[in-house]
Amino acid sequence: MDVKNLKDYLHWLYYQYLLITSIYVLEPWEQTLFNTVLFTMVAMVIYTSYVFVPIHVRLALKFFSGLCGGQQESTVALIS
Amino acid sequence: MARMADLPRNGSLTFQTSQDHSKSTTSKNGFHRSCQENGISNGVHHRSRVTEGFEQPPMYVAVFTYLGFGIVTLFGYLRDFMRAVGLEKCHVAQEREEQKDFVPLYQDFENFYTRNLYMRVRDNWNRPICSLPGPEFDLMERVTDDYNWTFRLTGKTIHGVINMGSYNYLGFAENNADFLKTVAETTMDYGLGVCSTRQEMGNMDIHQELEELVAMFLGTESAVSFGMGFATNSMNIPALVSKGCLILSDELNHTSLILGSRLSGATIRVFKHNNMQSLEKMLKEAVTNGQSRTHRPWKKILIVVEGVYSMEGSIVRLAEIVALKKKYKAYLYLDEAHSIGAVGPTGRGVTEHFGVDPSDVDVMMGTFTKSFGAAGGYIAGKKELVDYLRTYSHSAVYASAMSPPVARQIIRAMKCIMGQDGTTVGIERLRQLGENTRYFRRRLQEMGFIIYGSRDSPVVPLLVYMPGKVGAFSRAMLERKIGVVVVGFPATPITEARARFCVSSSHTREMLDKVLHALDELGDYLGIKFSRRRYIDELDS
Ligand SMILES: Cc1ncc(COP(=O)(O)O)c(C=O)c1O
């Protein structure tokens, strides 16, 4: 029963997705094309963010800490 | 809510709420009298009318609507590309090989739209009907094997589909042999065709009778009838105004009015829908500045409006327009195609709805195609106007006169509304229409749909917005055996696709309940209950 409900719900969600993006009116092969493109794009975004975000975060942290550290050093240098 | 802007706080814009305009014609039905006994003056309509509104949808709706159009357009380009390189067969007209270097014929937006957007949902329009289009009708089942490029009839009939789309406001599209007796007799006597124009051999006693009755019904001096409503507008406006005149036209006017205005050669300026400030600004400008280059005064200024707007269900602000027209000495052309017979306590249209004297409206135009269940149009007004049109209007001089059985049907329906047939059928139907309208509108609002228009207008547009949902909605309704009209882009703004219901007095409560039940279900399933307004029960109930 629950499985059936869930299935219905997922079905409905997909239907809503079809309606809201208006690909409901497209022919099946066009829908497949659209879904494939969208899926590929989303997958790529997720993958790239998985691969590159940690590196960028680390670099950014380093940069800012360097900035802060550097500034402190220079003020110290100026005062002295 | 710019469209809902209040009227100018201008001393001259007082309403006239006198009721004496219809004294000669309404006493028969007694409806007016009972109104007065209850102390409800026509002024009530003014106040309730202000509740008419155009609710804005949530922001995301507009975003997804544009997104949807964008996606479908992109695929349209893809398909066009495939057709161009020969990957796909082109089913529609296209340039011939030997005309490749000529000016392209099929590349404008309209063609693109038809080919790539409309074609995908084409099964929702032009469905073949094979019975009387009354409150219920039969549809011929049709299927498509190639995504709406061609249709094939299966030979089966879908019986008993509830008709929510015909302009059959008073249920006069009927085939009851008892009611149609006079029409049958007329057919026996006169035949069907006239084969001549009114100025030649087509001027019959039945036309005279019809015109006298129309004039009496409307409370005007005189009236003239034409065989087609569309041509009444498009051929008579050019007879009334010409170069050097100014037409102030509502932005949502019907195509027939637009065509007529263009054919006339007059300058056309468009004011915002039902927006009195916009109209007054234009009138003021027109009066003070005159014609654009020469600054000569305009020969005539004609304000062209409709009674009930067929796509929005809104009712014209007639009282204010009449006040403005008097203040600036303009003429008023009122197209009552949807309001005559359907609005006002005794069906006299918007003049009665607002308690405006019909003689304040210079040109009263209307059609017999809607409430009267017939065909044709009329123009009513002062005798000089009508006589002038009889002589100079193209559709009086060159068009064949109205078919006698059609004229008889109009006379029958009009007499029925006026109570002259000795029954109360007409007034009953009017009452039923009002009741159905208010019930239907109230329930839709309670369910959380965005609907447009005035509380009293039997045209009920339900906003669907997204192009995907429009197709899904109409198909799902047909599955539930309900025929609806959905309207999309060229007829409405691109983001405001809608379904339009026309309530009829012949809809029974069960039919309406069935429709409402289906709508409630579908509204949740498709996600088209966009309204964020909590519905507050108004003065009616
Ligand atoms: C406002 C208005 N005027 C004129 C017409 C044309 O009338 P007919 O269908 O009788 O030609 C219509 C028809 O839809 C209309 O809505």
Image (spheres, coloured by chain):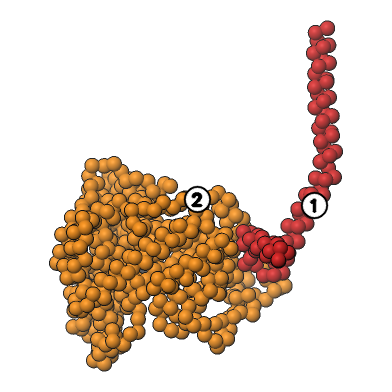
Chain colours: A red, B orange
Looking at the rendered structure, which numbered label has been put on residue A26? none
Q: In which quarter of the image is residue B458?
A: bottom left
Residue named by callout 2 = B532
Most extreme residue toward the top is A80
Label 1: which secondary element: helix
Whole-angstrom CA distance, mark 1 to mark 2, is 37 Å
Q: Which residue is drawn at 44% across and 80% down?
A: B137
Q: In this view, does B427 lie above or below B196?
A: above
Q: Quadrant of residue B185?
A: bottom left
Position of residue B167 measured from the top left corner of the image (x, y, whole percent)? 38, 71
Residue type at mark 2 is Arg
Residue named by callout 1 = A44
- Answer yes or no: are tags 1 and 2 on the same subunit: no
Q: Is residue B521 left or right of residue B403?
A: right
Most extreme residue toward the bottom is B188
Q: In this view, does B34 lie to the left or right of B273?
A: left
Residue B173 vs residue B532, the one in the foreground: B532
Q: Quadrant of residue B172?
A: bottom left
Position of residue B180 measured from the top left corner of the image (x, y, whole percent)? 29, 85
Q: Is residue B450 above or below residue B129?
A: above
View quadrant of ligand 1: bottom left
Position of residue B421 measured from the top left corner of the image (x, y, whole percent)? 20, 79
Most extreme residue toward the left is B24
Position of residue B258 measured from the top left corner of the image (x, y, whole percent)? 37, 63
Residue A41 vs residue B526, the one in the foreground: B526
Residue B41 vs residue B172, the one in the foreground: B41
Q: Residues within 10 Å of mark 1 (few under 14, many from 20)?
A: few
Residue type at mark 1 is Met
